[in-house]
Amino acid sequence: MNAIWGKGLSEEMNVTLGFLLDMGERKQGLMKIAASTCYKVYADGKMLAFGPQRAAHGFARVAEIPFTGKVIVVEVESSNVESYCWIKQEPFFACEVVCSDGKEYRAEDFACRRLTDRVQKVQRYSFQRAFAEVYRLKTDRTRFYRGEACFEPLETEEVKIPQLLVSHVQNARLALHFPLKQIESGRVETDENAPVWRDRAHTLVGTILQGFKIEEWEESATDEVSKFVYLPNESEKSGLKYTTWDFGRAITGFTELKIRAKRPGVIYVVFDELLWEEAGKGKNYVDFKRNGCSGVHKWTVENAGVFRVASFEPYTVRYACVVYTDGLEVEISQRDYENPDCGKLRFSSDDGQVNAIMEAARATLAQNAVDLLTDCPSRERAGWLSDSWFSSVAERFFTGDNAAERAFLENYVHASKKGLPEGMIPMCYPSDNVDGTFIPNWTMWYILEIEKYAEQYGCEGIVADSEENVRGILGYFEKKENEEGLLENLESWIFVEWSEANSPSHVCGVNIPSNICYAACLEAAGKVYANVEWKRKAERIREAVKRLAYDGEFFVDNLVRDETGALVRTGYLTEVCQYYAFWFKCATKEEYPELFEELMKRLGPSREEGFLPEMEKPNVMYGLYMRLDLLMREGEREKVLKECFDIFGKMAQRTGTLWENNNISASCDHGFASYAARWLVYALTGYDIMKGGAAAKEGIGIDCTLSLPAKDGRRLRIDVRDNRVHVYRPLAHVRAVKL
């Protein structure tokens, strides 16, 4: 493949180009494409794909897209800034089109246009993602997608192409959804005295972040929306109006509008996963800035006519407040961007709450396993370590394979370590290390994931290629070991979970959860790469933890130095630290029976009122996850189900997806939360989707049917009827023998 780009535009930020191929007649064929930063593909005006499936620095993945049509248009956006979502690389467009009649085309056969209706100098969408979307429309963009010359020609030049890799995951599903209901409508006034919103995504540009500074912005949709006052049930013939829509669940994808304009006007789409009640804003307020995101799209219509528009990148929307000027009629829809393989699993039960949580787990994974395993599809769209360990379990369950995880780990084989200490790897990838932050704990989870992947797919390929990373990580940690062999004074962002366990007072010195995890990753690495010394070191660390951190009742969160330089317990106690000890098998219930009993029976999401007030409560990530796994090990099926209801029931009801933690200011669509499916299946059937094995003989009072996909196409079916569990195992492939 040869690659091209607009002449003289390789250094510019937030540039959108359109590449048009008119084949003269309608044809069928296969298109191979790679581009940076991201692209959309259309055939005769119909959207076929969004890409790319992301790759490491210096690499790009090639997508194969079947098509039928006369005109192919590829819309390519180059952000050309560092972010967590897209790596910064030289923009390019590379393409091969092979038609069924034998005719072939290359990138240089496409006519190039600069799509000037997207405003270039605007704010970043978030700290983690690139630019918000603002448009000034002179014509209906879909005319260009159908082959009309709506924009001025642009000369191209040949540019360097990265090393090409295959894409592992199927092209995303692009189904269209319409709102389920109207929430509210009325009139909008403007309060000129209202303050505008400023985020680190705006104020840090020029220092930590790349982008356009505030004084460079041509427009700011969020500045304008900040001043809106919503007056429900009021209408006038002129001025700004609004309608708030509910799509029924959080949907990640492309917001599409059909606009009928009698005169020039403006449309804002304010979107989020939640509705709020806020003073001065009303009880059905869509907060565009929740989660630190600029959740507003803006289209200015400069002429009368009919316009069909869409956001270029995917965003997560349940609620959309459409604000528009008089003389415009606006219809809204959301085109989803999901992994189609997540629909391979078939599940139903006679319990509505079980069905809701299971569907929320499926939807959450589908939106976070489109090209690799991501934490959330809204704020970041980033491939985070640790999250991926849990997401990968759910991916195998829902799809029968680990295609997204394979891409994720392959990217880490080639990952850039720019700006990181020797041996360290990025906390999320593919991304740019915009501020030098890293999470040492997450690299431990990386080694644990390599172990899990090796158990499923063997030690060749990705696992073998990952050994250099593993050795580098363990070499980095070795330099942090103290006289007891424990990690002390770890650098950067020490992450245990979203609770008090993460506070500076708890993670300083010798952090016990980090050391427990360190022992587990040493053992995992020793097992995968046949290193006995790593295994021995793991056992020494466990013994040191039990000797130094256990105070006779509980494991304390950390040790610090006293005035003599000796290590002493701080006395800080969290549930999370206890869960770490048992989940990672540093402690066993046989060794600590009283602690284990208290932990399982009297703590957790339904802790007894007034019991152990000095012990800080856990959050969903990861304290309560470890707790549910421990309950599984103990065979506490009914308790697992009850706590799943307690933790995930409200999430599924409110957004139709599962959340980052129990705080509504965080992401409400977080990939690792799809792991909840493991507990539901175990509770109902006794079957562990991670380990396989036999199901229980009896149910717990809820009938269900489960059909599990496998990579080879065969299925395992489990039925629970009349409280009896029936397992129908797939037959092995039979070899025909001539008698």
Image: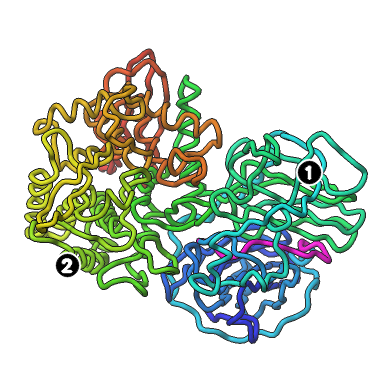
409 and 488: which is toward the camera:
488
Residue 709 in the figure: left or right of residue 333: left
**Position in image of residue 69 (x %, y %):** 70, 62
Q: Is residue 587 magenta?
A: no
Q: Which residue is mark 1?
A: 242
The three-letter code of the residue at mark 1 reads: Tyr
Whether residue 30 is visible to the viewer of this picture, yes or no, is: no
202 and 702: which is toward the camera:
202
Q: What range of the chain is rendered magenta?
A: 128-142
Q: Is residue 136 magenta?
A: yes
**Position in image of residue 91 (x %, y %):** 56, 77
The three-letter code of the residue at mark 2 reads: Lys
The residue sitting at 33% across, 16% down in the picture is 724
Displayed quadrant of residue 648 = top left
Height in image: 643 above or below 23?
Answer: above
The kind of secondary structure element at disc 2 is loop
Q: Main secondary structure of the magenta part?
A: loop
